[in-house]
Image (cartoon, rainbow, N blue to C red):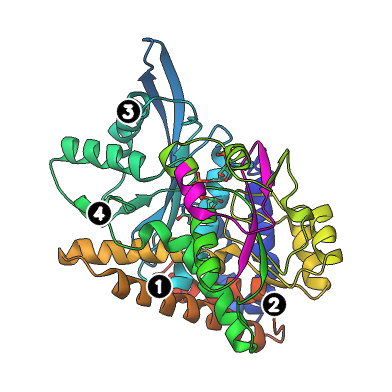
Amino acid sequence: KEKNPNEPEFIQAVTEVLTSLKPAIDSNPAYEKAGLLERIVEPERVVMFRVPWVDDDNNVHVNRGYRVEYNSCLGPYKGGLRLHPSVNLGIIKFLGFEQIFKNSLTTLPMGGGKGGSDFDPKGKSDMEIMRFCQSFMTELCRHIGADTDVPAGDIGTGAREIGFMFGQYKRIRNEWVGVLTGKGLSYGGSLVRTEATGYGLVYFVQEYLNCHDDSFEGKTVAVSGSGNVAIYATEKAQQLGAKVVTLSDSTGWIHDPAGIDLALVKQIKEVERARISEYANRKEGVEYHDGKGVWSVPVDIALPCATQNELLIDDAKTLVANGVKIVAEGANMPTTMDATDYLMENGVVFCPGKAANAGGVATSGLEMSQNSERLSWTFEEVDAKLQGIMKNIYHAADDAAKEYGHEGNYVMGANIAGFKKLADAMMAQGIV
Ligand code: NDP
């Protein structure tokens, strides 16, 4: 804590991981001798930089850019770029730290990293977004590369932003390489990447349900957020026969007891880039509420898909009182530690984001493979691979939890499964 003051999210993520790794660490004294934990928590490199840009009225703005290159033991640094006013070093470090274990769990050759800026894309024109992205990449391009560090999207960074950044990278470096993932399909993107995190989340839960003679059919589901992850989690859950009844954004939330009309959501969020409140204006029988509240609706399954620390202890109590069976994290660390403990203590199946939302980065890994081969795979091919990866992640977490005597504890299982591969590789590569 003294070494990382004012970084509460980072401390929270490290505490959660290290606590649950204890059995795996205690079982191998060589780790301590090799300073493994001290090295794992320290990023290999942190880059912070000025991002000046000019708005449509010729005013100059200066944002701060970040890239935390956390761990390259398993492959090139890999992780998204978050554009949101709340971004600071501690948040990027927490995300980068979690990313190491998540990427390890996918079994693909990817190290962990994360980046972004405190730039707020909301309300900006396309030209302002482009000027920001170009300025951001003008500095970032010195630090990344197809075999070094391959960023992707995250909150506030979608296909539009990735396109502007890719164009600027190519212009400065004079090379066409797969240096970013989440690219458009016309220039090296992968089919299924847009859907991957949300679909993968549902595939993970589906595997749990399959193994327990159950399915999504007829289940009621609460989803928070209304961005990339939320939309495609909703889509897949509905395709599998569930009824999704909520969505939200940072202003408020909707409750649609008849089930979310996803075509309408896509029109509002992806085409018009408007607020989720607009949904209630356009459909009968929908309630809109300001503030937070999706977790107050009685559901079988809750899928937090917005941001960190959005499901608090009181929400956990309400969910349990209303009979929730499964909470699976689409977002990164949306559930606070006390809320996680409460859910697990009360028999709720808890699927941590590190495992359950790994489908996005896994499909980014598949995009990198396609770029290296100079080939594009079909939707069915990528989707089948994604399903296979999510099934494997579920079983890796389940097996590790059983091996250490904590059956059903997927937090511990995911952390240990991700850690073991990383630890083996770090031990083999010496004190670096
Ligand atoms: P988007 O920007 O597409 O959507 C984010 C959604 O969350 C929006 O509805 C946004 O509302 C809401 N939100 C963001 N910040 C806050 C906040 N502080 N309070 C309340 N609501 C908020 O991002 P994604 O869907 O891509 O990402 C969502 C989560 O999933 C993040 O935690 C991200 O790290 C994680 N994730 C994403 C992956 C991906 O492939 N995209 C991969 C793995 C994890 P508003 O519009 O009002 O800001």
| Picture quadrant where residue 133 is located | top left
Residue 263 painted magenta: yes
| Disc 4 versus disc 3: nearer the observer | 4
CA–CA distance in space, label 4 to label 2: 38 Å
Mark 1, other Cα within 10 Å: few <14 / some 14–19 / many ≥20: many
Q: Residue at x 35, y 61 (%)?
A: 364
Residue 48 painted magenta: no
Q: Where is residue 17 in the image (x, y as percent from the top left)?
A: 64, 64
| Disc 1 versus disc 3: nearer the observer | 1
Quarter of the figure with the C terminus = bottom left
Question: Residue 284 vs residue 49: left or right?
Answer: right
Question: Residue 165 vs residue 244: left or right?
Answer: left
Q: Residue at x 80, y 59 (%)?
A: 316
Q: What element carries label 1?
A: helix
- Residue type for callout 4: Leu
Comparing 247 with 18, the one in front is: 247
Q: Which residue is drawn at 39% across and 26% down?
A: 51
CA–CA distance in space, label 3 to label 2: 44 Å
Sequence-wise first label, 3 or 2? 3
> Which span of residues is magenta-colored?
242-267
- Residue type for callout 3: Ser
CA–CA distance in space, label 4 to label 1: 18 Å
The residue under label 2 is: 409
Mark 4, other Cα within 10 Å: few <14 / some 14–19 / many ≥20: few
Mark 2, other Cα within 10 Å: few <14 / some 14–19 / many ≥20: many
The residue under label 1 is: 386
Q: Can residue 381 be seen in this view?
A: yes
The residue under label 3 is: 135
Q: Position of residue 153 (x, y in %)?
A: 41, 48
Comparing 344 with 281, the one in front is: 281
| Disc 4 versus disc 1: nearer the observer | 4
The residue under label 4 is: 185
